Image (cartoon, rainbow, N blue to C red):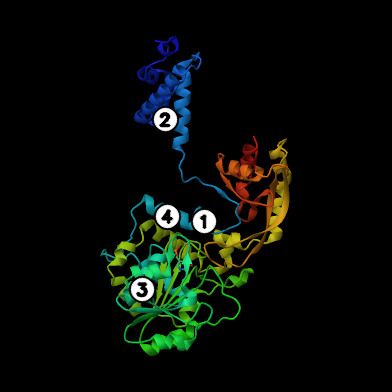
Amino acid sequence: MEPGLRALPSVDQLLMAPDGQSLARHYGKALATGALRAALAELRSAIREGAPASAAPAAQVIATAEANLAAAALSPLRTVLNLTGTVLHTNLGRALLAEPAIAAATEAMRDPIALEYDLATGARGERDAHLRALLCELTGAEDATVVNNNAAAVLLALNTLGAGREAIVSRGELIEIGGAFRMPDIMARAGVQLREVGTTNRTHERDYRGALGPQTGLILKVHTSNYRIQGFTAEVSAPRLAALADEAGVPLLNDLGSGSLVDLGRWGLRREPTVAEAVAEGAHVVTFSGDKLLGGPQAGFIVGRREAITAINRNPMKRALRLDKIRIAALYATLRLYLDPDRLTERLPVLAMLSRSQAEIAAQAEALLGRANDALGASGITASVISCDSQVGSGALPTDLIASAALALAPPSTDGAAPDRLAARLRSGGQPVIGRVRDGAVILDLRCLRPGDEPALLSAIAEAVR
Ligand SMILES: *Cc1c(COP(=O)(O)O)cnc(C)c1O
């Protein structure tokens, strides 16, 4: 045997060395043993292939094992700095929750809670009851229920109201949103026949009227949240559709998508139809998301007339789509914040971020600029402050850009691939930073950068150019 191989310690010897013992204490014996064995095998084959024998093989193997264990211990669900300018970034987990919601979720995880238990009587309670009263108060609806997400809300509502019959929907509203949610496919899985009426750009009341008949289960209206049809267009308003539905004795389901509980116009954003408006317009059932503009955890809300909601709650699919206690607790705390709309922008992160002015963000960028250039050091990359556009994301207000400001990190322009390389290094550091590449620079939109995140951003920049 080669002397280099003969000098290698055994796994048992490594586990008895002080560093090996501390590795086993930290990661557990099973993981430490596996990592040491793998590191040993790696060194053995390197020596066989002619690598020079190590002067301190035990220390080398333990160091390799430790590095591999530390890397594997990092959760793949890393926290990142979202500097994409998209506030509700679906791939980055959509809404950040408010502190009271985080506290409520934590409590619900740690302690038993009165989830389906009536403390007054000691009898069994209902898990949706806590949310129902709040939702009715905030939306003006008679009744309300919650499920896993809005896709589930639409599926459940369609299946309950229209299985075996037709849902009439305008051709201009047959949406696809990301993640393979396509209205025609959801309808098929809900057991509802799609009855398209009108054309892509124009649908009239007579189109709906012509399609109504004994085979009709419901009329569906979909808020075309992620695109806008412009030009020569016509759609039938929700109040007119509700009147038509009442006349025909079928329900109107209005899928709002994002939906908002407050008028966003108040903070200078474009108005989205509010849920209360959709309810007041006469829809029998309104569906919307928990983790879009509402700013809570993933959930789907179904609010509307009592008869329809009762039928939806009786559908056996409801049990398969129901919410867990953690999210119910977080939703309850989130919805409570809406009872005090004046303080929403202070307390609800989604609204806090959306309502920041360009001037405020530009001032934050200017204040960071010197330190960003220090962090870039002698790399040849320069930082500057530019104006840019943020967006809401998740299909909400898709054509609306919100004026914002960014740090632009520009490598010397001679190397066209340099911005992509810099963006990749920013993504793969100890604190991943997600920006976007544009015009030869990495653009870091600071709309979603909280003051406490600034030191982490500066060290991430320094690490990326090291
Ligand atoms: C986002 C959206 C959905 C799906 O909502 P999720 O909560 O993501 O499941 C359904 N319909 C519309 C119109 C949407 O915008």
Query: Foreground mark, 2 or 3?
Result: 3
- Residue depicted at x 56% and y 72%: 228
Q: How busy is the neighbourhood of tag 4: few (under 14 within 10 Å), some, or many (20 plus)?
A: many
Label 1 vs 4, first from the N-terminus: 1
**Between marks 3 and 1, how big is the CA–CA gap?**
30 Å
Q: Secondary structure at mark 3?
A: helix
Q: Are marks 2 and 4 in contact (CB under 8 Å)?
A: no
Q: Secondary structure at mark 2?
A: helix
- Residue depicted at x 49% and y 80%: 199
Query: Foreground mark, 3 or 1?
Result: 3
Whether 290 is drawn above or below 434: the answer is below
- List the residue tagged with mark 1: 96
**Between marks 2 and 1, how big is the CA–CA gap?**
32 Å
State yes or no: Cβ of the residue under disc 4 lies below 8 Å from any atom of ligand 1. no
Label 2 vs 3, first from the N-terminus: 2
- List the residue tagged with mark 4: 105
Q: Are marks 1 and 4 in contact (CB under 8 Å)?
A: no
**Between marks 4 and 3, how big is the CA–CA gap?**
30 Å
Query: Foreground mark, 1 or 4?
Result: 1
- List the residue tagged with mark 3: 158
Query: Foreground mark, 2 or 4?
Result: 2
**Between marks 1 and 4, how big is the CA–CA gap?**
13 Å
Whether 39 is drawn above or below 384: the answer is above
Task: Provide residue 430's location: percent of width, then percent of height.
Answer: 55, 39
**Between marks 2 and 3, how big is the CA–CA gap?**
52 Å
- List the residue tagged with mark 2: 26
Task: Provide residue 351's location: percent of width, then percent of height.
Answer: 57, 63
Whether 121 is drawn above or below 216: the answer is above
